[in-house]
Image (cartoon, grey):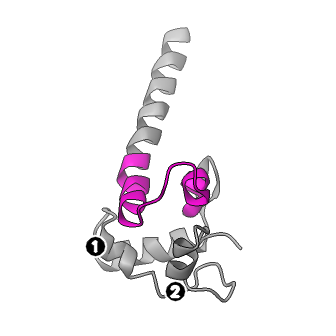
Amino acid sequence: MNKLIAIGSTLGIAAFALSLSMFLKPFDTTYKVAKGSNLDKAACTVCHSSPKGGKLNGYGTDLKAVLKAENTKKITPAILAKVESKDSDGDGVKNIDEIKKDQNPGAK
């Protein structure tokens, strides 16, 4: 039983690390997110409603729609650019303007 728990934990950590590199790293690189900044601290909540992932917020939902339309699962600068002019969180400010102000485009 302990062996099964250890394997499950290891797989969970690996999946988490993979998701960070696949989704968060391109965002951080594209927008030159500074270590310790608000966006850096936001981490998963840039796209998700919770720091643990799960349900997508408005920004994550908009990115998901673009990924589907482009028939890809890879976040790239071009994919990110397609949601820059949107106001994913409905607060009256475009995503790119929030990102430039070091604010989370997925949170009001």
**Quadrant of res 27:** bottom left
**Amino acid marked by disc 1:** Asn
Visible residue check, residue 104: yes
Residue 94 at x, y percent in the picture: 56, 85
Circle on res. 99: none
Q: Look at the image and say whether residue 37 sits in the magenta stretch.
A: yes
- Element type where label 1 sits in the image: loop
Task: Report the quarter where the C terminus lies.
Answer: bottom right
Q: Is residue 25 above or below residue 16?
A: below
Residue 88 at x, y percent in the picture: 58, 80
| Of residues 90 and 70, the one drawn nearer to the viewer in this rendering | 90
| Of residues 97 and 95, the one drawn nearer to the viewer in this rendering | 97
- Element type where label 2 sits in the image: loop
Query: What is the chief secondary structure element of the magenta stretch?
Result: helix
Residue 74 at x, y percent in the picture: 30, 62
For the point 43% across and 77% down, which residue is it? 65
Visible residue check, residue 1: no
Q: In the image, 107: left or right of 10? A: right
**Amino acid marked by disc 2:** Lys
Q: Residue furthest top?
A: 2
Lower position in the chain sequence, tag 1 or tag 2: 1
The crowding category of the residue bearing disc 1, from other C-alpha atoms within 10 Å (few below 14, some 14 to 19, many at least 20), is few
| Of residues 10 and 59, the one drawn nearer to the viewer in this rendering | 59
For the point 49% across and 11% down, which residue is it? 3
Q: In the image, 71: left or right of 85? A: left
Disc 2 designates what residue?
Answer: 86
The crowding category of the residue bearing disc 2, from other C-alpha atoms within 10 Å (few below 14, some 14 to 19, many at least 20), is some
Q: Is residue 5 above or below residue 54?
A: above
Disc 1 designates what residue?
Answer: 71
Query: In the rendered structure, which segment of residues is drawn in magenta?
Result: 20-46
Q: Look at the image and say whether residue 39 sits in the magenta stretch.
A: yes
Q: Is residue 8 above or below residue 40?
A: above
